[in-house]
Image (cartoon, rainbow, N blue to C red):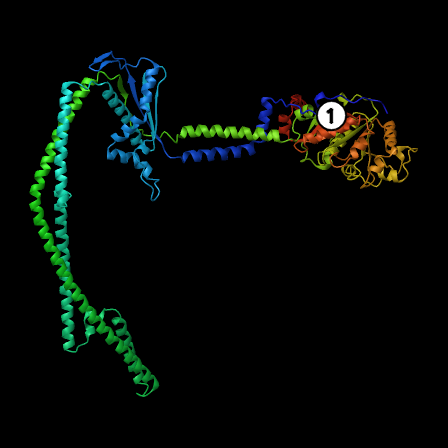
């Protein structure tokens, strides 16, 4: 056996250091494409859920009012020199703090009218729980943000509120109250005219208050809401009582008529059930109908039976009972009629008394109306005088102070037509961004979590081995064809891939013929038998005398793929004494089968649950050495390393190793571990064959672009 040295691999793997994966944009594109159907639904679920949650948020409206500070001249007042100008950032910030102060906020709240307060509270009342107090005007201002525009003297008052009208109202009220505050602050208050008007306003205000107080006292004394309202109340009362009295009178007359009719029938001893009131009362109709039925039955029985017949006697008793019940029901109806008549008379009497009282109240209200009108006129005159002098005072103060105020309203707030939140366009952008983020995070995150072999980088950088070739997925091909691709001589899918593996094996091999090559994998089902058969066929096709040995003694499969029996082989040879003196090709216990001109097959010769006795025997190594003397190449198909340790025993007696990995099947860390074990055994690991990729994945998952041109070239010749 020729001496050889193992091929060194990257130092990072010698030290068991984890290599750093450097991926290109093309690699990330492959990752996204491979995991699209996992990442895309998750991204859609997250994006749609976020969008639904944001769209369900309460609507918020935004109104903006702006003000502008100017630089008026310095003013001299009776109180001293006043310079209201805003000359620097500090002074502007001072005014902003005043705008944001609790004092101005309180001033704004106190300036709202009752109707405006109801407007502020309107959206909050919808979600008010039973028994919960109505929020105050201060709590219903919404979100108020006051700030200055950069590098300018412009101030904007931004209000966000669930009600659009309330948002505009609060913004404009802040501007108005701040303007009023500045007018009071900078105004000269010692002027004679202003003081006179103020004194007059105080006096007239007191007079108006006294007149209003007298009017209220008169209302309270005589229990009056107002003259008009009291008149309406009395009028409504008279109308209602009169209507009720008329109804009661008609009811009493009807009852008296019915009662008189009953009295007449009683005197004449007539049947009271002929009166409609009696006939329809309570159980009378039912009893009368029942009595009539019994009488009819009696007339029928009288024709059949004698008077003393039991049925006649029983029927007579029933008639007597029903008649007695009917008489009592009639008596009850007469008594009920008398009771209702008495109640009707009493009700009529009460309504007559109520109507008389209402007439007296109406006459009394007419007498009170004269004094009430006098007091009301006095209060209206006093209030009118007070309002007139107050307006005059405001006009005078404003006209004297308006030029002193360094603030001018710029744009008032308008009622917004569309809500500020939820903003559909912003929600769409946010959901799109979040969806893309989740999509990329899931896809790329799974790629880092998934440790299975997938690409050329996994083979060459992580495992530290040569990529000998990539075999496309041949599951669609028949078993008779795919294990004999290289022997059939036909141009079929996968032939060029095996030829590229054949070329890579020759390039990376440092040993001359004859030699032995072990083909193994990590787990079952990765295609090592497929690779062994077609690799042996490739060398045989190129004139090398090749022997294919089935060393998977626990689960041999090669004989099936070549349609041969498994009666002779390694196990039968070993059990027969392991004769090495005889020509191997004619040894009946080995039973080497010639498959083609340059390809022979050595089967397992059965199954063995414990093949280590054979594999550890020196005779097995001697057999391989004898095989190499008669053949140029010995290819050994072995069990997977992850299942049993047989392959490591075989690897000690072979020259080179080819490792087979199926796409997306075995884990990189396991492959790297077994590759390290093979290298520690001083084996020459030629490289890895990546198996089972679809044509599209072959194109995407390899970095070897020559594969495309290689396929096109041979495809055009085929």
Along the line of sight, which residue is nearer the eye, 8 or 188?
188
Query: Which residue appears at 60% of the width and 29% of the height?
Result: 447
Marks counted in the figure total: 1
Left or right of 607 in this view: 347: left
Left or right of 10 in this view: 244: left
Q: Is residue 395 above or below residue 216?
A: above
Q: Element at badge 1?
A: strand
Residue 646 image position (x, y, % from top left): 79, 35
Which quarter of the rendering shows the C terminus? top right
Q: Is residue 493 visible?
A: no
Left or right of 364 in this view: 307: right
Q: Is residue 313 visible?
A: yes
Quadrant housing residue 502 = top right
Q: Is residue 89 above or below residue 533?
A: above
Residue 500 image position (x, y, % from top left): 72, 24
| Residue ID for mark 1 | 687
**Residue that lies at the very extreme toward the right in this rendered image:** 581
Residue 250 image position (x, y, % from top left): 14, 61
Along the line of sight, which residue is nearer the eye, 233 or 296?
233
Along the line of sight, which residue is nearer the eye, 158 or 440?
158
**Residue that lies at the very extreme toward the front in this rendered image:** 79
**Residue that lies at the very extreme toward the top in this rendered image:** 73
Q: Is residue 553 above or below residue 418?
A: below
Quadrant housing residue 172 = top left
Query: Which residue appears at 17% of the width and 64% of the height?
Result: 343
Quadrant housing residue 174 = top left
Along the line of sight, which residue is nearer the eye, 442 or 195?
195
Query: Which residue appears at 13% of the width and 64% of the height?
Result: 253
Left or right of 594 in this view: 456: left
Residue 561 image position (x, y, % from top left): 76, 37
């Amino acid at each position: 056996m020729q001496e050889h040295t193992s091929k060194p691999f990257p130092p990072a793997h010698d030290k068991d250091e984890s290599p750093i994966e450097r991926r290109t944009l093309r690699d990330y594109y492959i990752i996204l494409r491979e995991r699209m159907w996992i990442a895309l639904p998750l991204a859609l679920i997250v994006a749609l859920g976020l969008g639904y949650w944001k769209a369900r948020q309460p609507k918020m409206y935004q109104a903006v009012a702006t003000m502008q500070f100017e630089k008026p001249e310095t003013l001299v007042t009776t109180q001293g020199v006043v310079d209201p100008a805003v000359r620097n950032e500090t002074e502007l910030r001072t005014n902003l703090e005043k705008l944001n102060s609790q004092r101005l906020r309180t001033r704004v709240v106190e300036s709202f009218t009752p109707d405006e307060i109801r407007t502020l509270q309107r959206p909050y009342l919808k979600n008010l729980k039973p028994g919960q107090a109505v929020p105050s005007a201060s709590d219903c201002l919404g979100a108020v943000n006051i700030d200055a525009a950069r590098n300018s003297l412009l101030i904007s008052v931004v209000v966000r509120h669930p009600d659009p009208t309330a948002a505009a109202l609060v913004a404009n009220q802040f501007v108005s109250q701040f303007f009023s505050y500045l007018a009071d602050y900078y105004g000269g208050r010692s002027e004679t005219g202003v003081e006179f008007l103020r004194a007059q306003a105080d006096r007239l205000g007191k007079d108006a208050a006294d007149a209003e107080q007298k009017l209220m006292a008169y209302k309270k004394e005589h229990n009056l809401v107002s003259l008009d309202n009291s008149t309406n109340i009395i009028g409504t009362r008279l109308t209602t009582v009169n209507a009720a009295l008329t109804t009661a009178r008609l009811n009493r007359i009807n009852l008296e008529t019915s009662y008189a009719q009953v009295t007449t029938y009683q005197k004449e001893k007539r049947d009271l059930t002929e009166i409609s009131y009696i006939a329809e009362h309570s159980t009378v109709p039912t009893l009368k109908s029942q009595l009539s039925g019994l009488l009819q039955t009696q007339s029928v029985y009288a024709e059949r039976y004698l008077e003393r017949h039991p049925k006649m006697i029983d029927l007579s008793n029933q008639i007597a009972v029903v008649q007695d019940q009917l008489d009592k029901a009639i008596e009850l109806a007469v008594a009920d009629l008398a009771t209702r008549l008495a109640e009707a008379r009493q009700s009529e009497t009460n309504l007559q008394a109520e109507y008389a009282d209402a007439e007296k109240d109406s006459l009394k209200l007419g007498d009170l109306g004269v004094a009430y009108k006098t007091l009301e006129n006095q209060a209206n005159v006093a209030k009118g005088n007070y309002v007139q002098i107050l307006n005059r005072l405001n006009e005078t103060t404003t006209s004297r102070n308006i030029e002193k105020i360094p603030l001018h309203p710029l744009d008032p707030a308008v009622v917004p037509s569309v809500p500020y939140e939820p903003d559909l366009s912003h929600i769409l952008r946010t959901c799109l961004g979040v969806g893309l983020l989740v999509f990329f995070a899931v896809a790329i995150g799974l790629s880092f979590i998934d440790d299975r072999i997938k690409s050329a980088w996994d083979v060459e950088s992580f495992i530290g081995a040569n990529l000998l070739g990539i075999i496309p997925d041949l599951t669609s091909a028949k078993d008779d064809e795919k294990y004999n691709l290289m022997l059939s001589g036909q141009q079929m899918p996968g032939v060029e891939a095996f030829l590229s593996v054949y070329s890579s094996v020759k390039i990376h091999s440092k040993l001359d013929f004859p030699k032995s090559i072990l083909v193994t994998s990590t787990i079952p089902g990765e295609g090592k038998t497929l690779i062994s058969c077609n690799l042996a066929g490739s060398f045989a096709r190129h004139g090398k005398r090749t022997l294919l040995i089935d060393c998977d003694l626990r689960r041999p499969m090669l004989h099936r793929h070549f349609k041969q029996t498994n009666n002779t082989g390694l196990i039968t040879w070993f059990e027969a004494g392991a004769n090495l003196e005889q020509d191997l090709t004619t040894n009946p216990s080995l039973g080497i089968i010639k498959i083609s001109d340059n390809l022979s097959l050595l089967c397992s010769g059965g199954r063995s649950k414990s093949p280590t006795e054979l594999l550890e025997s020196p005779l097995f190594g001697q057999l391989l050495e004898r095989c190499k003397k008669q053949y140029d190449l010995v290819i050994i198909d072995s069990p997977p390393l992850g299942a049993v340790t047989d392959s490591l025993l075989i690897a000690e007696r072979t020259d080179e190793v080819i490792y087979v990995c199926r796409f997306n099947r075995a884990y990189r860390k396991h492959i790297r571990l077994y590759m390290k074990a093979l290298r520690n055994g001083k084996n020459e690991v030629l490289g890895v064959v990546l198996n089972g990729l679809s044509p599209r994945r072959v194109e995407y998952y390899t970095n070897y672009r020559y594969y495309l041109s290689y396929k096109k070239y041979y495809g055009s010749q085929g």
